[in-house]
Image: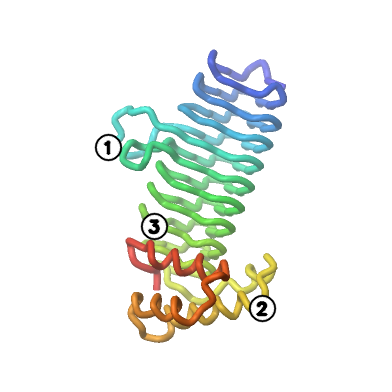
Amino acid sequence: MIHPTAIIAPGAELDSSVKVGPYAVIGEQVKIGAGTTVGPHTVIEGHTEIGCDNHIFQFASIGAIPQDLKFSGEVSYLKIGDRNRIREFVTIHLGTEDGGGITTIGNDNLLMAYAHVAHDCIVKDHVILANAATLAGHVEVDDYAILGGLSAVHQFARIGCHVMASGGSMIGQDVVPYAIVQGDRARVVGLNLTGLKRRGFSREALANIKNMYKLVFRSNLKLEEAVAQIESQFDMTSSEVTTYLEFLQKSERGLVR
């Protein structure tokens, strides 16, 4: 399962079913779970834990130290879940002390060629980062978000669930769940209704999302006024309502408009 030209440091923990391609380098603090494939010339280093059934393609760089001038060699971590596809030349960095010390990738994500996940990011589940999509430090990307090719997200910004960012989007603030954004600088241009329908959202849920969107983006209300309207007018047992409301209430950078 391990090519004879691969270099596996003493102390690395690899399940017996892990496949490692030619000239790959795996550091002594790395742990890799069952069924994962590591492609040729890949470098995996640092305190990095990788789950099961991932496919890491050739030339990826996983677990390198952060590109953060404040980083001073402190112990920090990277954790990657299960069933992720990490394509050619993807870079994913360790966390920093200031950011909680860990970068996290969830499950069932696709990181296309040249995508970058910086220190202390949280990428949840079923996320797609298209070619050369770039996350600065401390970015959070929620479930089923899609970032188009050559898009970039400012540090500390948050991307809500089921968001679609068009290729080349420059995102400087938080993007509310279910929205479509595009442009330099990115702005909200509508709802990701096609994606939501494909994922089985009911008519009632779609109606709630449309009406909340209108309150926030089409009513000329201040954000706190729109939040109050949502709290008073919508069924707070509906998951799409609570998801939207919680995102608005936790926004610190302000919203992409």
Give the secondary structure at mark 1: loop
Mark 1 residue crowding within 10 angstroms, few (<14) / some (14–19) / many (20+) = few
Measure the C-alpha gap from mark 2 to mark 1.
48 Å
Q: Which residue is mark 2?
A: 203
Please report the residue visible at 32 percent of the width from the left and 39 percent of the height from the top: 68
Q: Which residue is mark 3?
A: 157
Please report the residue visible at 68 percent of the width from the left and 26 percent of the height from the top: 18
- x%, y% of residue 88? 59, 40
Front residue of 147/231: it is 231
Q: Please state, as top left, top right, bottom left or bottom right, where the N terminus lies in the image.
A: top right
Three-letter amino acid code of the residue under disc 1: Lys
Q: Which residue is mark 1?
A: 70
Q: Earlier in the sequence, mark 2 or mark 3?
A: 3
Which quadrant of the figure has residue 237?
Answer: bottom right
Mark toward the viewer: 2 or 1: 2
- x%, y% of residue 82? 63, 40
